[in-house]
Amino acid sequence: MTATRGGKAPGGVAGLILAGGQARRMGGLDKGLVPLAGRPMVEHVLDRIRPQVDEVLISANRNQDVYAGYGHRVIADVVGDYSGPLAGMLSALLVVKHAWLAVVPCDSPLLPNDLVERLLASVVAESAELAVAHDGERLQPVVALLHRSLSVPLRAFLEGGGRKIDRWYRQHRMVTTDLSDHPEAFANVNTPEDLAVLERQVPGPRPPAD
């Protein structure tokens, strides 16, 4: 059970791994299934987020049977296809039973082991509706914690044509969570070059040499 520094999370926390994008800069590959240190990238993210939450969901618009093989609920976008991270968040908020939803991308394998605890501490301290990670220089908008009640305004925003995540965040009681002590947490994979860099940072078995 996830806990804040002051006790258990009020209402519990579900975790959402965003794997629903098109990854154009990766040649259209499904980033969550791209091998990293001998394992699909989503497996590294699952290792990090699963112990921190009460339930895991995976947002995916393709290869859903593969993701389902990890034993967690897989959900597709309910507003359009490939409509950005907010669409994945909405799909999860509409079905989640816990009060809070912790959101992480499928291509950030070095997330802190206390990520959810720190996001929760921020929203509790400020009576906020959502917390967004900050790396010390900029917001990291797809590493966030949202209250389930935000499903109503988020659906209205998306159905009205909104897509910009920062703009929607600013419409609500948002707090930032300082994660500048974990700069590696925001190393993600947008290009083959990014993948090569992460290969040198992520532990794990390497495939046999040709």
Image: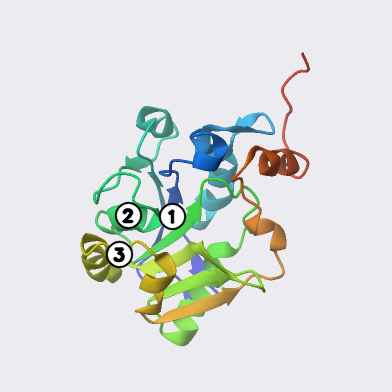
Q: Amino acid at mark 3?
A: Gly
Distance from the alpha carbon under mark 2 to that under mark 1: 15 Å
Mark toward the viewer: 2 or 3 = 3
Which element is circle 1 on? Answer: strand
Distance from the alpha carbon under mark 2 to that under mark 3: 10 Å
Q: Residue at x 33, y 61 (%)?
A: 98
Asked if labels 1 and 3 touch by Cβ distance under 8 angstroms, the answer is no
Q: Which residue is mark 2?
A: 87
Name the residue furthest top.
Answer: 210
Residue 36 location in percent, x, y?
65, 35
**Lower position in the chain sequence, tag 2 or tag 1:** 1
**Lower position in the chain sequence, tag 2 or tag 3:** 2
Would you identify the image quadrant in which residue 39 lies? Answer: top right
Q: Along the horizontal axis of the image, is 65 left or right of 121?
A: left
Residue 7 location in percent, x, y?
49, 74
Asked if labels 1 and 2 touch by Cβ distance under 8 angstroms, the answer is no
Q: Which residue is mark 3?
A: 162
Residue 93 location in percent, x, y?
30, 59
Q: Amino acid at mark 1?
A: Gly
Which element is circle 2 on? Answer: helix
Distance from the alpha carbon under mark 3 to that under mark 1: 24 Å
Q: Measured along the vertical axis of the image, is residue 129 above or below residue 199?
A: below
Name the residue nearer the viewer: 123 or 164.
164
Mark toward the viewer: 3 or 1 = 3
User: Is residue 171 among the parts visible in the rendering?
Assistant: yes
Mark toward the viewer: 2 or 1 = 2
Q: Which residue is mark 1?
A: 15
